[in-house]
Image (spheres, rainbow, N blue to C red):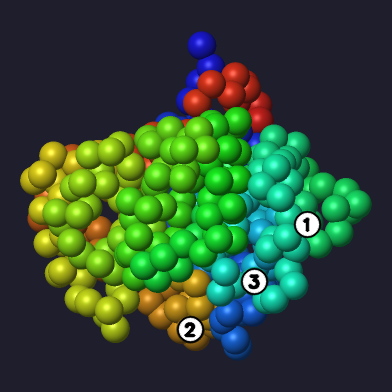
Amino acid sequence: MAIPHVMSVTGPVPVDRLGVVDAHEHLLLDSPALKNQDFTDPAKAIEEVEDGRATGIGAIVEMTPIGLGRNPQGLRTIAEATGVVILATSGYHRDAHYPAGHWVYDAPVEVLADRIVTDLTVGMHPSDWNDPSLPLDRARAGVIKGGASYHRISRAEQRRLEAVGGASARTGAAILVHTEVGTAAHDIVDPLVGAGASADRIALAHLDRNPDAELHAEIAARGVTLEYDTIGRTKYHPDSLLLDLIEAVAAAGHLDRIVLGLDLGLRDYLRAYDGGPGLRYLMTAFAPRLRRRLGDADAERILVANPARLFAIAGAGESVAGAGAA
């Protein structure tokens, strides 16, 4: 029987080697929707990741998708320099991140899906699939991203979600979908499942922007994972509100459907660029409070066991022995 593993940028890694997982992060990013907030320097990213590793983070799910300056070679450099397991992303964001005329608007669902599957199973495209003739990087993606707009899914986003769901069905890879301010949750899950994705391979990001515990329990009851990632984002809410939300969802019987990330998607959030809170915040500021609220065992399930289950690629049948993974 195949050993459960994730696909990192340096190769397959058994899930029992991951440790604490930051389930939603950005290390290298350049989006036209985020003016003057790009961060593309691998050396700065190494500095940031080392800071997080020193606090106990063992693995990072890097959620920069196609079209936002994805850099597979840079991610390999970071993983090799730090020893932190890094999962890279294929898939697509919401419309706001793609300028008019971008190829994602015109590509048929089959092409959108095939490019995701190639990233996952052969190698990642080194330049956001802008020139399909370029040779692929040897790093493979390990997760798929989707995206939707505020309280709605545009026609173009709908097609991309169908492609994302179909690619997950073909590969077994997990899906993490951007929800704008935590909205349209059920509407996002429906087309993914309709395209063949299993609900237990789906996670919804930023749901804590809409801290509705009753809604979250409904989503979790469908088998979907709740990804909370506005930790330390005091401009939205204090961490105590997020801790209250986690307690309520756990009390409703869905502790196993919660994972955490920081989603440091702006230069201003990174300590390596003189910003904050930085990667250290998860384990130095939030995890101790989580342990006090839930106890050590339940906190470990959220930080270690739940993301290991979510991001494991089931049935891939690859050996992890001697994989040379980070």
According to the picture, the residue beneath numbered tag 3 turns out to be 98
Disc 1 crowd, CA 10 A, few/some/many (<14, 14-19, 20+):
some
- Disc 3 residue type (three-letter): Tyr
Residue sitting at x 64%, y 71%: 98
Label 2 SS: helix
According to the picture, the residue beneath numbered tag 1 turns out to be 129
Task: Quadrant for residue 269, please give it.
Answer: bottom left
The percent position of residue 156, horizontal first and vertical second, equals 59, 61
The percent position of residue 178, horizontal first and vertical second, equals 45, 61
**Label 3 with label 2: CB-CB less than 8 Å:** no
- Disc 2 residue type (three-letter): Asp
**Label 1 with label 2: CB-CB less than 8 Å:** no
According to the picture, the residue beneath numbered tag 2 turns out to be 268
Residue sitting at x 74%, y 72%: 101
Q: Quadrant of the C terminus?
A: top right
- Disc 1 residue type (three-letter): Trp
Q: Give the CA separation, mark 3 to mark 2.
A: 22 Å
Label 1 SS: loop
Label 3 SS: loop
**Label 3 with label 1: CB-CB less than 8 Å:** no
The percent position of residue 124, horizontal first and vertical second, equals 73, 48
Q: Is residue 197 above or below residue 105?
A: above
**Which of the two discs, 3 and 2, labels the residue nearer the N terminus?**
3
Disc 3 crowd, CA 10 A, few/some/many (<14, 14-19, 20+):
some
**Which of the two discs, 1 and 2, labels the residue nearer the N terminus?**
1
Furthest residue in direction top, as rendered: 1
